Image (cartoon, rainbow, N blue to C red):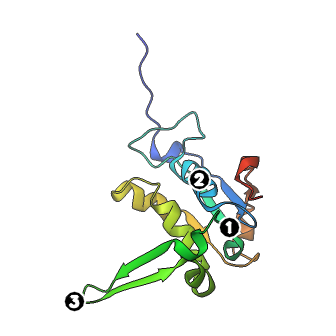
Amino acid sequence: MNKTSVPSIDSIDRQWYLVDAENQTLGRLATEVASVLRGKNKASFTPHLDTGDFVVVVNADKIRVSGNKPQQKLYRRHSGRPGGMKVETFTHLQERLPERIVEKAIKGMLPHNALGRQMFRKLKVYKGAEHPHAAQQPKPLQLDPAATAQ
């Protein structure tokens, strides 16, 4: 009878990947990145372990959404105080903090527990083309060609 092998924490080989978000559709990019963060692209994927890789996303300020979403998509946050709800459109948030748009989209596709928070820490998002992770020699991650906005 075959036994299911569970990889030990020490045996997990973590790679660094670089994703250029320029002219990419937000949701399609987020699903690919979330899959890599979870480790679903590996044969050693285990649902209850963090087997994923590190992902660096650059050019977050050049991400695209389709249709009327730039004006209609809303991002909400609450201060915790009565009347503390803040609502912001995609366009305003992209001008102010473009990294947060990509982070929020990817975080919503990860598990909503401690394991998901651990996976989210391996995501690095930058609004420009420069990033401080050159020493890790990230490999370019090939995304699905359908993810590119028309």
Residue 47 percent location from the top left of the image: 42, 40
Percent of width and height locating residue 117: 40, 62
Q: Quadrant of the N terminus?
A: top left
Image quarter where the C terminus lies is bottom right
Closer to the N terminus: mark 3 or mark 1?
1
Q: Amino acid at mark 1?
A: Arg
- Label 3 Cα crowd, 10 Å radius (few <14 / some 14-19 / many 20+): few
Between residue 140 and residue 91, name the one nearer to us: 91
Label drawn at residue 64: 1
Spatial separation of the CA atoms under disc 3 and disc 1: 34 Å
Seen from the viewer's position, the closer of residues 5 and 72 is: 72
- Could you tell me which secondary element the residue under label 2 belongs to? loop
Where residue 21 sits, quadrant-wise, is: bottom right
Estimate the spatial distance between the alpha carbons at disc 3 and disc 2, rounded to whole Å: 40 Å
Q: Which residue sits furthest top?
A: 1
Find out whether the residues at labels 3 and 2 contact each other: C-beta distance under 8 Å: no
The residue to which callout 2 is attached is 53
User: What is the residue that sits farthest to the front in this orientation?
Assistant: 68
Between marks 3 and 2 in the image, the one whose residue lies nearer the viewer: 3
Q: CA separation, marks 2 and 1?
A: 24 Å
Q: Amino acid at mark 2?
A: Asp
Secondary structure found at label 1: loop
In primary-sequence order, the first of circles 3 and 2 is: 2
Name which residue lies at 47% across and 62% down: 107
Three-letter amino acid code of the residue under disc 3: Pro
At x 57%, y 68%, the residue is 102
Q: Position of residue 134 (x, y in %)?
A: 75, 69
Q: Earlier in the sequence, mark 2 or mark 1?
A: 2
Q: Which residue is mark 3?
A: 82
The answer to whether mark 3 and mark 1 are in CB contact below 8 A is: no
Q: Determine whether label 2 and label 1 are within 8 Å by CB.
A: no
Residue situated in front as seen by the camera: 114 or 90: 90
